[in-house]
Image (spheres, grey):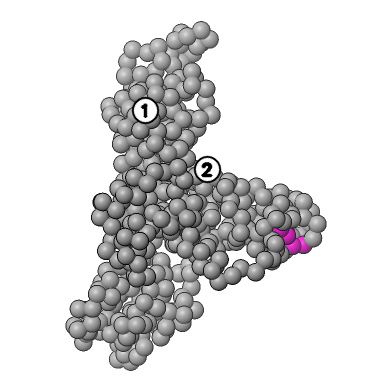
Amino acid sequence: MLVYLSRSPDDTLVEHLTGCGWHVSIARTSAECARVIRPDVPYAGIVDLSRYTARELGMLETGLRQPLVGWVALASADRLDEPDVRRLIRSYCFDYVKLPASPPSVDYLLGHAFGMVSLTDLDLATGVASAGDDEMVGTCEAMQQLFRTIRKIANTDAAVFIAGESGTGKELTAVAIHERSPRRKEPFVAINCGAIPHHLLQSELFGYERGAFTGANQRKIGRVEAANGGTLFLDEIGDLPLESQASLLRFLQEGKIERLGGRESVSVNVRVISATHVDLEGAMRDGRFRADLFHRLCVLRIDEPPLRARGKDIEILAHHVLHKFKTDSARKIRGFAPSAIEAMHKYGWPGNVRELINRVRRAIVMAEGKLINAEDLDLAQFTDQETMTLAQAREAAEKRAIEAALLRHRHRLNEAAIDLGISRVTLYRLMGSHGLRDPAASEEKLNETDDAGAAPASREGKTATE
């Protein structure tokens, strides 16, 4: 399958590619490109960048972001000097050909691009990642970035740290990494460090020998040793007491454990994935978490996006949960009423995906009609039907854009400000006005960011001194 995106397709090239066995679909705009492409089928793609004006290039990005299309760009020598053309090729294309192009050369590169994109994990590319008995669902850019990160991380053996609010699906991400790794046939062992009493945590992690303490009538293998060959997932690692942190650090350094009451070291080969909703940087400053352990655990980092930052995914997830659990009710539920959709988008979802699942499951059982409404979700107060002014809409969009930029750049203000096209000082001020930073933060933080080098002027015409 081949999609050819061009204002004026080259008939000679189309004839040659058809003769080589390609089924060619022609699109002249990104919208046409989206219509001809099936979301679950890999494609080779040609994008003729020489046929579009500089103003039209930005509108091509939507089409070029298709995850299952291996693009090869065509461009004239003079267009290759344009920064926007070079950026599109660098960001979205497997290769490019300088015009005039030889049809056999284009055919060869298309074959390579198609072969590479055919290796893509189709579930991840289409927004559904299987993770054991559950699935990760998402089509927003934040989730697509998460899926791409999972693909990259799965093939390494380095320790992974997953940060995110409660209910965002950190364990699902850990399972998805394990199931796409070379260790997928070996055990995946999860332990919630915050759910086990501190005095039992050592023996749970590392096991014990018979007679190690009163009641130890036989040897017990710990969770770390049980994961040998596979993956050990340490959830809520921020709740780990300091004495257990020291033992875990020693294991990570040496690859060996000692069972409680034992005298010999046992070699264990596991990949460690850890997660927490706790701010570990703050915990390290307060002396509640060891910095050396953090750096051992956080070789690779993943930031889970909160549900409120995932836009249209909220509705997609709700329909996914409804489809999965609709048999919980004897009544045939057909979908969601407009009031439910409105309420779900207005609500802040402090419990994230876990809360959404629980609310929808409860609504499936309690709904009186065939459509779930806002009252069934216990969100009736979020459907006041008030008209939103243009200023309110702009403010809401601004807050979402800032949240997304901070998430992408892991709260590195300088990089987020550059991404948003504003100065660091402006970003810090906007974070305060939208409630995205600690209200108790001192003015010295603002001065710090200013001294560190604010951007000279933002795209909206404001200066770094505003």
The x, y position of residue 236, in whole percent, is: 47, 35
Residue 287: which numbered mark, if any?
Answer: 1
- The amino acid at mark 1 is Gly
Q: Residue furthest right?
A: 368
**Displayed quadrant of residue 88:** bottom left
Please give the residue where the numbered disc 2 appears in the rendered image: 166
- The amino acid at mark 2 is Ser
The answer to whether the residues at label 2 and label 1 have Cβ atoms under 8 Å apart is no
Residue at 38% x, 30% y is 286
Predominant SS of the magenta segment: loop
Quadrant of the drawing holding the N terminus: bottom left
Residue at 61% x, 47% y is 355
- Label 2 vs label 1: CA separation? 23 Å
Quadrant of the drawing holding the C terminus: bottom left
Residue at 35% x, 33% y is 285
Question: Which residue is at the front of the view, 217 or 425?
Answer: 425
Say what secondary structure mark 2 lies in: loop
The x, y position of residue 329, in whole percent, is: 76, 52
Q: Is residue 196 magenta?
A: no
The x, y position of residue 82, in whole percent, is: 23, 78
Q: Which stretch is magenta? A: 370-374
Residue 363: which numbered mark, if any?
Answer: none
Say what secondary structure mark 1 lies in: loop
Using residue 90 as the reference point, say whether residue 235 is left or right of it. right
Please tell me which of labels 2 and 1 falls first in the chain: 2
Foreground disc of the pair 2, 1: 1
Residue at 39% x, 54% y is 428
Using residue 367 as the reference point, say whether residue 167 is left or right of it. left
